[in-house]
Each structure stands twice: as C-alpha cells, then as structure tokens.
Amino acid sequence: MRFPFPSPFPRAAWRAILLALGLVLALPPVSAQELRLGFVNTQRILRDAEPAKAAQRKIEAEFGKRDKELQDMAARLKSLSERLERDAAVTSESERTRRQREFAELEKDFQRKQREFREDLNQRQNEEVQQLIDRANRIIRQIAEQEKFDLIVQDAVYWNPRIDVTDKVLRALATAK
C-alpha cells in the first residue's frame, strides 16, 4: 500500500504501530476507576532532591581547585595579552616574537586544560545524575508496588496534581541511604 504523501516513519515502524494499536484494541475494556496512575516530575527530582544537592556540593568541592586554577590562568592570559598590546611599539621584534610565542603556548595550554576540565566535570555530573536516577527509579518501583499503582509516568506534557507522587519520592530519597 502506498501513501500519497511521504511517511515520517519507516515501514517497520508502521508495522510496530499497527501491531501495538491492535493489541490495545484487543484488550478488554477497563474503566478509569480501576486504573491507578501516578506521575513523577524528574526535573524536580534532579533539582530538589537532597541527594542531588549533596552531589552538587560534592562536585563543587571536587572541581573547585581546578576551576580556580583555570580562572587564574585566564587572568594571566588577559594580563599578558594587554601587556603585549601596550608594549608592542617599544619592544624589539625578537622580544615581541618571543612574548607572542609564550602567549600562544599559554593559551593553547589553557584551552587544553579547560576542555579537559569540562569533559571531567560533565562525566562526574553524569555519573552522579545516573546514580540519583537509579535510586529514584528503585524508590518509584517500591511506591508503585506498595500503593498498588498500575502505571507511574515520568516527564509528561500535562498531569493532574492529584496523581503527582514526586513529593513522596523526594521524601523517600531524603530518608533513604
């Protein structure tokens, strides 16, 4: 079967969509009262959970010294650049060339260290976020099983506040070790 318009999905995706739709339609009807739904706001967990705040403090302490070194190096670069511009007219050609080479080497070293810092920082942040998400997911499963939820969704476009269980997850994360 050919559609008169280009399909946004490949043929295999259409098959999967149609199969899923068929399965849903084949299920016996369930009334809304029997289905227990919940919602967890992941962004709130990552922002407000005590373990997230503790992880942020830990990362700041871990990377603070390197950040300070980079700031000092940037200030040195700026000072050296200003001195090069200010003294350009009164320095000899060989001295100016030597200073420019020194500046270029320092700038190259700064950029390398800055890139390494960003990569290391991103990796550590990702590790901490993943640990927090894993802990939160375990707690969400526990809440779902204990309170007999049929489905708990994360990251929805709209949710009714009465099905929001984010506060329960935040409290459990704060007390769990």
Image (spheres, helix red, strand yellow):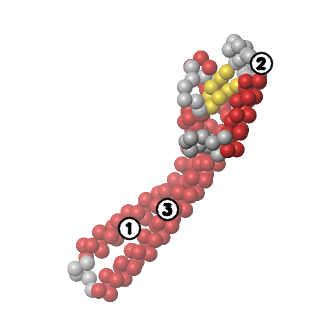
Task: Measure how far apart labels 3 and 1 are at the Cα level.
Answer: 13 Å
Q: Earlier in the sequence, mark 3 or mark 2?
A: 2
Considering the numbered disc 2 on the image, is that residue within a helix, a strand or a loop? loop
Query: Which amino acid type is marked by label 3?
Result: Gln
For the C terminus, the quadrant is top right
Residue 143 visible in the displayed image: no
Task: Measure how far apart labels 2 and 1 are at the Cα level.
Answer: 71 Å
Where residue 56 appears, as percent x and y from the top left, is 56, 43
Up the image or down, 78 lies above or below 61; here it is below
- Say which of marks 3 and 2 sits in front: 2
Q: Earlier in the sequence, mark 3 or mark 1?
A: 1
For the N terminus, the quadrant is top right
96 on left or right of 40: left
61 on left or right of 146: left
- Say which of marks 3 and 1 sits in front: 3
Q: Which residue is mark 3?
A: 114
Q: Earlier in the sequence, mark 2 or mark 1?
A: 2
Q: Which residue is mark 1?
A: 77
**Which residue is drawn at the image coordinates 52% and 53% (left, top)?**
64
Where residue 91 appears, as percent x and y from the top left, is 26, 82
Near-viewer residue (77 or 129): 129
Query: Which amino acid type is marked by label 2?
Result: Pro
Residue 149 location, quadrant? top right
**Which residue is drawn at the image coordinates 47% and 57% (left, top)?**
68
Query: Which amino acid type is marked by label 1?
Result: Leu
**Which residue is drawn at the image coordinates 73% and 26% (left, top)?**
24
Considering the numbered disc 1 on the image, is that residue within a helix, a strand or a loop? helix
Q: Which residue is mark 2?
A: 28
